[in-house]
Image (cartoon, grey):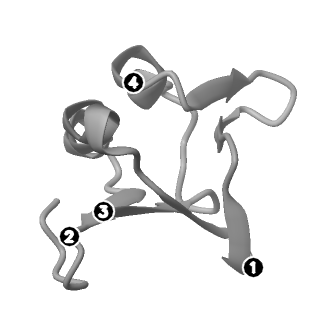
Amino acid sequence: MKIEYDRNTCTGMFQCTAEWDEFVENRQDGKADLLESEEVENGIFVREVPEDEEFDAEMSARVCPVDAIKVYDDDGEQIV
């Protein structure tokens, strides 16, 4: 499973940080940061999700009010 985070779209509501510990508040920028991610293009961050953290990653995407977080299964299909 892979998670993709569009930091440019993030509005800093930080709801994702309550769902998954890999999202942390960056109060200076007013946006969340996705730990251990790679910036694949300007403002788009991607990382693999450990199997035991899949539910939390999915929930972080579901609670994002601006849909800045997408989750993909191992076949590349978007599931959230």
* Front: mark 1 or 2: 2
Residue 70 point in image, percent of width and height: 32, 63
What whole-number distance in Å separates the C-alpha atoms at marks 3 and 2? Answer: 5 Å
Q: Can you tell which quarter of the image residue 35 is in? A: top right
Label ID, residue 15: 4
User: Pointer 3 and pointer 2: residues touching (CB < 8 Å)?
Assistant: yes
What whole-number distance in Å separates the C-alpha atoms at marks 4 and 3? Answer: 21 Å
What residue is disc 3 on?
Answer: 1
* Badge 1 element: loop
Toward the front, the furthest residue is 51
Q: Quadrant of the N terminus?
A: bottom left
In percent of the image, x 29 and y 44: which residue is there?
Answer: 51
* Front: mark 4 or 2: 2
In percent of the image, x 25 and y 84: which residue is there?
Answer: 76
Identify the mark nearer the N-term, 1 or 2. 1
What whole-number distance in Å separates the C-alpha atoms at marks 4 and 2? Answer: 22 Å
Depth check: give the residue in front, 67 or 17. Answer: 17
Mark 4 burial class by Cα count in 10 Å: few <14, some 14-19, many 20+:
some
